[in-house]
Amino acid sequence: MPNRIARLSVCAVLLALGCSVPLSAQSAPDARPAADADSMAAALKLRGSIAQAVAAGTTKPEDALGQLREESSPTGLKLDPDADFAFAAIDVGHRLLAAGKTVQAEKVFQAAEQSLDTVVKRTANAQAREKAQYLTQLSLIRGNYLNKKDQARQDIDEAIGLQPEDKDLKRAKDALGVPAAEFLQRNAPKKG
């Protein structure tokens, strides 16, 4: 039962981050310890304070990114270090956008892009599910925040090539470059 609760906690944090991190990485045996609720809560608080400091102008985005890099797991999920950093940076970027700090958010998203690009390059195609999820996040960053629509489409096409039956990837492709309101309207359930 505690394992199930830990997995549910991981899912809740992932939803809060807006990320689709491979949960199989959490259950696969490796050298990294499993995520726990306390470390995820501490990481969430840290990202909030980092974003707040950048938004207030007391910390430069570069210094904030350095703080995230120094953390052993800035998401608390204890993932691959580059993926962990990228997902934490995405969260900070979203918080900065919400605060109206677009210039600072762009710098943070650029760092997340570089980190995810590194993860994608070293993730084997045999790990299709994980690689597709990393490519999807890379596509969303490039397409939604960095105005790199062509690269974003290439990323999502590669992800679909790895997981051709995944309907969520196809929806993600449809959402690229489409304002949120229009996308939601197009994909709303049909009234009977």
Image (spheres, rainbow, N blue to C red):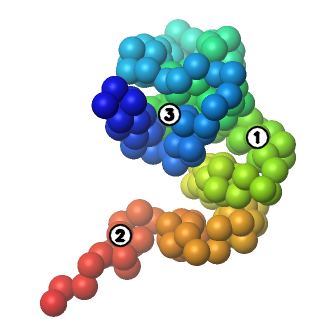
Nearest-to-viewer mark from 1 and 2? 1
| Residue 192: % across, % down | 15, 90
| Residue 189: % across, % down | 27, 79
**Amino acid at circle 1:** Val
Q: Residue at x 38, y 21 (%)?
A: 37
Q: Which residue is mark 3?
A: 91
Whole-angstrom CA distance, mark 1 to mark 3, is: 18 Å
Q: Which residue is mark 1?
A: 119
Q: Which residue is mark 2?
A: 184
**Amino acid at circle 2:** Leu
Q: Dots 1 and 2: beta carbons under 8 Å?
A: no
Q: Residue at x 52, y 48 (%)?
A: 20
Helix or strand or loop: what does disc 1 sit on?
helix
Residue 143, quarter of picture: bottom right
Could you tell which of marks 1 and 2 lies nearer the N-terminus? 1
Q: Nearer the viewer, residue 71 or 129?
A: 129
Q: Residue at x 41, y 71 (%)?
A: 183
Q: Relative to 187, does residue 98 appear above or below in the rendering?
A: above
Q: Dots 3 and 2: beta carbons under 8 Å?
A: no
